[in-house]
Amino acid sequence: MDTKLKKSKPFLVWLCFFVGANIIVSAIMLGIAASDEIYCDIDEIRIALKLDLKASQNFKIHITSEFDYLAQHISDNSDMFIASGKSLDILNDEGENLIYYAVNPKTGKVLTNSKTDFGISEKGIPSLPEGYDYYLYYNGEKFLAEQDGKPLDIYRNDSGYKMSVLQRYIDENFSADTPDIKGCKILLMVRKDIVENPYANSFLYQLRKDLETIRWIIIIFAVVFLFGVALLALSVAKWKIKKEFDKKLIKISGAIWFEIKLVISLIAFIFLFALLFNQYYHYDVVGFLFARIVPAALCCWWLHLMFIDLAANRRKFFSHNSINSLIKLYRTIERKKPFQKAMLLRVYALIATEALLVFLTCVFSIGTVVGGEGGLIIPVLVFVAAGIYLIYRYLRRYSNTINDIGKIVDHIEAIKNGDMETKLTLNPDADLYLAAENLNKVQEGISRAVEEKVRSERMKVELITNVSHDLKTPLTSIISYTDLLSKEENLPEHVKDYVKILMQKSERLKTLIQDIFDLSKATSGVMKVEIEKLDLGKLIRQTLADLDEQISQSGLLFRINMPDEPVYIMSDGKKLYRVFLNLICNALKYSLAGSRVYISLNVENNKAVAEIKNIANYEMNFKEDEVIERFVRGDKSRTTEGSGLGLAIAHSFTQVCGGNMDVKVDGDLFKVVLEFNLQ
């Protein structure tokens, strides 16, 4: 139950807004339509609320009419009026609500429904009997009136009496059809509480009932108006809840084409304008309600719906039209075809549609000119506007497609440059949306593959690091004990040879493990680097000086070409020393006997370029990028003592130091090129 109430709450709040607004607007329109009458009858409305019958204009008109009837029968020329069929029944029908007394001293004629003259023959001023509070009295010369003990001045222009039949008596405009009552005394007295006459229809009683009806109408109108104000105030207080139901109305309105909404809105606006500014009407309240208020309310509510629809949907309010709907239907068909065929089909469809619109425009234009049908100009304008709009839509779509192609090309370039994080985002309605999504998936696949490779490489490095670290402890013990054995005396010669071999192999194993450990640190990115300003030429010369003995024993000719002035770079001197040490040792191990080794240093394009070239003593049947891999040796027969880590360490250390190392092979010529940015 609570769930249902919660779901219906937005509708109930909106219904309060709807009913309250209708009541208030209807009341305002009724007030505007009857503004003249309300302004003129404001006193009558006040009288109706007080139920003061004797102050109402209808009472004054009726009592003066009854006075006129009495005057006609008491006047000197009463025979003329009696002969015309005018009787006193209208006075007698009032029963006890009305007492009348009339006397003509000239003729001695008396007309009354009472047995007393109420003192008018003696005092000249009547005395009201009990239960009566009003009298109208003519004493033969002037009029006297009293209500609730207060005299009334009927001679005032705003008294209301001068607007009745009494006017001709007050002005003494006695024409041939006016009774001559000079010298006559005529008295009318009205009961305080008007009662119904059971024997005849009392007009005074009917006036009282009408006044009560008017009072109830005014009260009900005020209550309904206040009820409408309360409902509207409630809906304003719950405006957020009311807007939830507005969303449902907007959803329904949003499904209607813009052309239909435009036509209905124009009709509603014109009709509302006509209703508001056409002042001629002749309706009763019910007729005014159905002829004016209901149509005006429907127009206003439609325009209100269009306003909230426009505020919520904005551009979609205009874009949801018949042309766009047909275009969407066409695109549904187009998406089922390959991209190339879809683009060609779009061009053919545009040409065919434009040709049809041109044909229809020509036909209706001929009908307008030849047939003289001015109304046909509207379809002509519609066809022209539709043709222009279709061309605009095609060009805009074409421009968007070109831009999307450019984005895809740029994204491919970014992927090529290693950007695996940035995703390509296109409008879901774009022609190349699926292509962009597929490219993103390819990018994700490459990124995952790279991550897996990096993870695998890291695991290898960690394994090597851990193994090399674990091997250091037992190897240190082996070296120590081997050294102790070598110092033992009286060892046989062959045992000494064994110990010597153990010492050589353990030292080589120690060097290999250290190389593995250093290489793993370099490739894992945890190696500490101390950057400083250093002279690269001086570093190379120092390395050569340290290897001078080995160079002399190798029988190789070293050709050194370096500038005399310093070549400064920012790098780690210890690491670079290790790089050049490995490269020169590599040349000493693998150069052809008696050949030359060339070492040079040059400055090119703001870079320091160092080269080491030598002729290999074996056939170099490997790829240039393979030889710098770990545990890969150029001499695949492995007849030399290399471990396959020298170039790998040199390459990794060079990168750590901010440089770049390339290996080039040309026949038997082996060349290593190192580049560093100049300081």
Image (cartoon, helix red, strand yellow):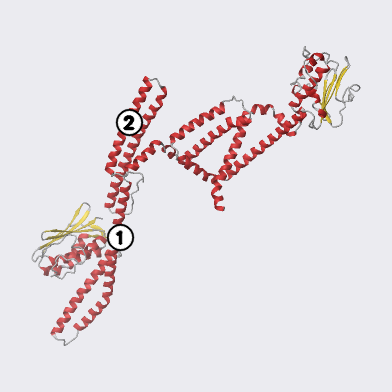
**In the displayed image of the protein, which residue is found farthest to the right?**
122
Residue depicted at x 49% and y 37%: 306
Instruction: Answer whether residue 603 is visible to the viewer in this image.
Output: yes
In this rendering, the label closer to the viewer, 1 or 2:
2
Answer above or below: position of 32 versus 447: above
Q: Quadrant of residue 531?
A: bottom left
**Few, some or many residues within 10 Å of mark 1 (<14, 14–19, 20+):** few
Q: Quadrant where the C terminus lies? A: bottom left
Position of residue 264 in the picture relative to residue 525 (left or right) = right
Answer above or below: position of 71 versus 647: above
What secondary structure is found at the residue carrying circle 1?
helix
Position of residue 171 in the picture relative to residue 665 (left or right) = right
**In the displayed image of the protein, which residue is found farthest to the front?**
199
Q: Residue 676 has which mark?
A: none
Residue depicted at x 62% and y 34%: 27
Disc 1 from disc 2: Cα separation: 58 Å
Question: Which residue has dot 2 on it?
Answer: 356
Question: Which residue has dot 1 on it?
Answer: 451
Instruction: Answer whether residue 581 is visible to the viewer in this image.
Output: no
Residue depicted at x 61% and y 29%: 287
Answer above or below: position of 641 versus 29: below
